[in-house]
Image (cartoon, rainbow, N blue to C red):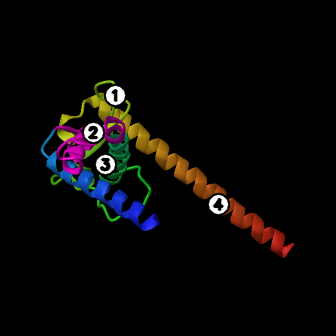
Amino acid sequence: MANKRHSLTELIYAACREAVLGHGGDIGIGPAAVASEAMKTLDKKAAAPVVVAWGCNLQCRHAARDILRHKFDPTDEEDTDDTVEQHPLFPDLQTRYPTKRGGGRDSEYILLEHLTDAEIDYNATRMERSANKLLHHRDSLIAYKESRREESSG
């Protein structure tokens, strides 16, 4: 059963990855749009019962959030095979950044050239907060290591 569940999850992720590629030229890419596209692949005839289609759509949204975050979020710490897309003229920048548009629950990943100043500031602040949290965590870890050393030598 676990292998079947794993292969079904991979099928959903593969459909979502394809959908992300299909939206490559769009100004914004969000989990809802990716999930809708993936559902067209997974249930071509729209034959699934409504409750099953809804559950699959929710799982597709979850997969889409995961894929988009790994692909476009500079604060994502998880190591994956997906490489963050870099901007061709500014290699230290990405092609897209997350922002809230349209009042939806999920972030949309917007092309760099289409971000407002406020959206750029929002992302810069997110990155600074994330960096500060990591530095604080690093300092705490080093302090813990030092305290262990003191305990073992004392």
- Name the image quarter holding residue 70: bottom left
Which residue is tagged 4?
A: 141
> Would you say the residues marked 3 and 2 are in contact, meaning their CB atoms lie under 8 Å apart?
yes
Which residue is tagged 3?
A: 68
Q: Nearer the viewer, residue 60 or 133?
A: 60
Mark 4 or 3, which is nearer the eye? 3
Circle 4: residue type: Leu
At mark 1, the secondary structure is loop
- Mark 3 vs mark 2: which is more N-terminal? 2
At mark 3, the secondary structure is helix
- Residue 65, percent across and down? 35, 45
Binning the other alpha carbons within 10 Å of mark 4 as few (below 14), some (14 to 19) or many (20 upward) gives few
* Residues in magenta, as a range: 27-54
> Would you say the residues marked 2 and 1 are in contact, meaning their CB atoms lie under 8 Å apart?
yes
Mark 2 or 4, which is nearer the eye? 2
- Residue 36, percent across and down? 24, 40
Location of the C terminus by quadrant is bottom right
Check the image and report above or below for 39 versus 50.
Answer: below
Can the viewer see residue 26 in this picture? yes
- Residue 117, percent across and down? 27, 30
Q: Nearer the viewer, residue 60 or 22?
A: 60
Which residue is tagged 1?
A: 104
Q: How many marks?
A: 4
- Residue 135, percent across and down? 55, 53
Which residue is tagged 2?
A: 30
- Residue that protrudes farthest toward the left in the picture: 25
Specify whether 127 is left or right of 34: right
| Structural distance between the alpha carbons of marks 4 and 3 | 30 Å
Specify whether 75 is left or right of 82: right
